[in-house]
Image: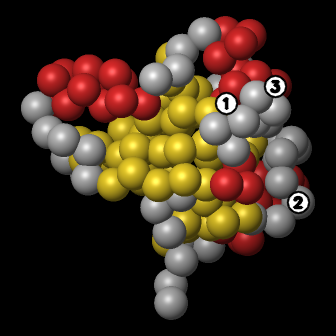
């Protein structure tokens, strides 16, 4: 069973967006980090058992920069926590879903991540994530 892990929101200005979402949610972000491989800075807010992740591009060629250029700021993806990301990737491939990754990659918040192509998920970019166990 999947658990809603977080909702990702693409933003142009992290500082202004952190202030906005802190006012909306009534809490400050608990973590901010750069994911250089993806060309983004992320900021996380706890919302009960789930999180809100803000994503700001750090390079013009990043997926977030391209997304904002094409669609503007807003909801970028929905992420679900899984126990075994490799098994879930294989299950989804077998069920006919197109994945954007051949293998999981390291993402923000100490997670392994992979993405399901929106064209095979009713236009929604779906992220699967698994906590990295040290």
Q: Is residue 83 visible?
A: yes
7 relative to 118 in the view: left or right: left
Asked whether the residues under the numbered discs 3 and 2 touch, taking CB atoms below 8 Å apart as contact, a structural biologist would say: no
As drawn, 71 above or below 92: above
Residue found 55% across the figure and 66% down from its top: 111
17 relative to 26 in the view: left or right: right
| Classed neighbour count for the residue bearing mark 1: other residues with Cα under 10 Å, few (<14), some (14–19), many (≥20) | many
Give the mark nearest the N terminus, 3 or 2: 2
As drawn, 106 above or below 4: below
Q: Is residue 122 visible?
A: no
Check the image and name the residue furthest to the bottom.
134
Q: Secondary structure at mark 2?
A: loop
Instruction: In this rendered view, identify the residue nearer to me: 32 or 89.
Output: 32
Res. 119 mark: 3
Asked whether the residues under the numbered discs 3 and 1 touch, taking CB atoms below 8 Å apart as contact, a structural biologist would say: no
Image position, residue 105 (x, y; %)? 73, 64
As drawn, 20 above or below 69: below
Instruction: In this rendered view, identify the residue nearer to me: 98 or 95.
Output: 98
Give the mark nearest the N terminus, 3 or 1: 1
Residue for badge 2: 102
Q: Secondary structure at mark 1?
A: helix
Residue for badge 1: 64
Residue found 36% across the figure and 30% down from its top: 15
Image position, residue 2 (x, y; %)? 49, 54
Quarter of the view holding residue 121: top right
Residue found 46% across the figure and 61% down from its top: 109
Asked whether the residues under the numbered discs 1 and 2 touch, taking CB atoms below 8 Å apart as contact, a structural biologist would say: no
As drawn, 35 above or below 9: below
């Amino acid at each position: 069973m999947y658990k809603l892990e977080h909702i990702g929101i693409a933003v142009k200005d992290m500082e202004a967006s952190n202030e906005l979402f802190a006012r909306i949610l009534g809490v400050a972000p608990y973590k901010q980090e750069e994911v250089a491989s993806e060309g983004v800075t992320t900021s996380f807010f706890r919302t009960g058992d789930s999180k809100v992740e803000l994503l700001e591009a750090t390079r013009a060629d990043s997926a977030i920069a391209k997304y904002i250029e094409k669609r503007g700021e807003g909801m970028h993806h929905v992420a679900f926590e899984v126990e075994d990301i490799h098994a879930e990737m294989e299950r989804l491939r077998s069920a006919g879903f197109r994945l954007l990754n051949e293998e999981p990659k390291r993402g923000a918040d100490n997670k392994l991540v992979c993405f399901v192509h929106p064209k095979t998920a009713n236009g929604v970019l779906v992220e699967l994530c698994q906590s990295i166990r040290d």
